[in-house]
Each structure stands twice: as C-alpha cells, then as structure tokens.
Image: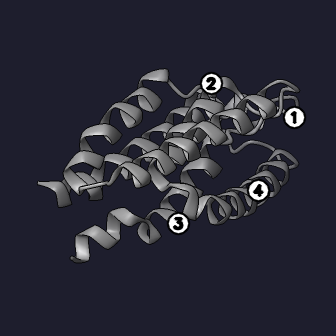
Amino acid sequence: MMQVAVLTVLPAAVAFAAAMDLFTMKIPNAISLLLVLAFFPMALFAGFDPWSFAVHLAAGALMLVVGVLLFIPGWFGGGDAKLLAAVGLWIGADNLLSYALYVALAGGLIAVVFFSVRAVPLPRVLLAEAWALRLHRHDSGIPYGLALASGALLVYPHTVWFAALGG
C-alpha cells in the first residue's frame, strides 16, 4: 500500500496541477492541500524520525517563503507558490537545490517554447479553443506549473521516499 501511495500521490498531484495550469492558468488550492495533508500520514508510515519530519517541514516552509517572494512582484501566481511549498514538503531539504535547478531549466525551456510558438500563427484546429487562444496571446503569462511539476517529477526518484521503497 505504501509503495502505491509513494508512486502515485505526488506524481499524480503535480501532473494534474500542470494540466490545470496549462488549460486554465490556475492551480487549484485543493491540489496543494491534498499534498500537504497526504504528507503527514505518509511520513508516519514511512517511519520518519522527528528530525526528518522537521527537516521536511522546514523545506516546505522555506519554499513557501520563496513562493511568496516570487508572488509579490508578480513573477509567480498564488497557486504556483502554494504548489512550490507543498512539493518542498515532500522532497525535503536534501533535494531543494536540485529541485530549484530542474524547475529553472524546465521553466526556461518552457518559456522559449511558448515565445517561439507565439511567434507563429495558431493552427486553424486550435482557433476554437479558448485555452489555446489564451496561451497564444503575447500578453499572456507562462503556466509555470509545468516547470514546477517537471522539476518535482525529475527530483522525486532521488528522495527518501524511493530509498524507502528499496528497503
């Protein structure tokens, strides 16, 4: 049961968050809340000691501060900030730098793709799709949930959750 939860909870939640951000430019609070609430029983079942538990909480809190600081000037949406914090809770302090690197690289790649696609006319088949029109507009933002999810999926296999699966 623990193995199924480790292999599905975070990956499914961040994949859904990325899809929601892509199609609506919003990441529902319920996704971040689900991740936070699922972390606590998972940590207990995984046998986290108090120190490990505290380190994961600190990582989540640090990512919340970073997310808020990115939200204030408008570089991040509120959903992005909350998802960043929830993912930080799961991946722990050991993986924050790797996560930040993966998110930055994925975000840069996604921005280049979006700016390149916006430079060409939208294919006729997508002209009737409101989400495609919104994403194609030059004044529209970039759904950064895609980068947050990509980073999470890339770093997650290197976390204590997968180490626990092998044991």
Please tell me in which quadrant of the rendered image residue 129 appears: top right
Mark 2 vs 4: CB contact within 8 A:
no
Give the Cα separation between the discs numbered 4 and 1: 13 Å
Counting the numbered discs, the total is: 4
Badge 3 or badge 4: first in the primary sequence: 4
What residue sits 65% from the left and 41% below the top? 62
Give the Cα separation between the discs numbered 2 and 3: 30 Å
Q: Quadrant of the N terminus?
A: bottom left
Q: Nearer the viewer, mark 2 or mark 3?
A: 3
Circle 1 packing at 10 Å, graded few (<14), some (14-19), many (20+), is few
Give the Cα separation between the discs numbered 1 and 2: 15 Å
**Residue 96 visible:** yes
Q: Which residue is mark 3?
A: 154
Q: Secondary structure at mark 4?
A: helix
Please tell me in which quadrant of the rendered image residue 52 appears: bottom left
| Of 134 and 149, the residue lying toward us | 149
Identify which amino acid the numbered label 3 is placed on.
Leu
Numbered mark located on residue 58 in the image: none
Identify which amino acid the numbered label 1 is placed on.
His
Q: Which residue is mark 4?
A: 113
Q: Position of residue 147 (x, y in %)?
A: 64, 51
Q: Which residue is mark 1?
A: 138
Q: Nearer the viewer, mark 3 or mark 4?
A: 3
Q: Quadrant of the C terminus?
A: bottom left
Q: Which residue is mark 2?
A: 130
What residue sits 80% from the left and 34% below the top? 70
Badge 1 or badge 2: first in the primary sequence: 2
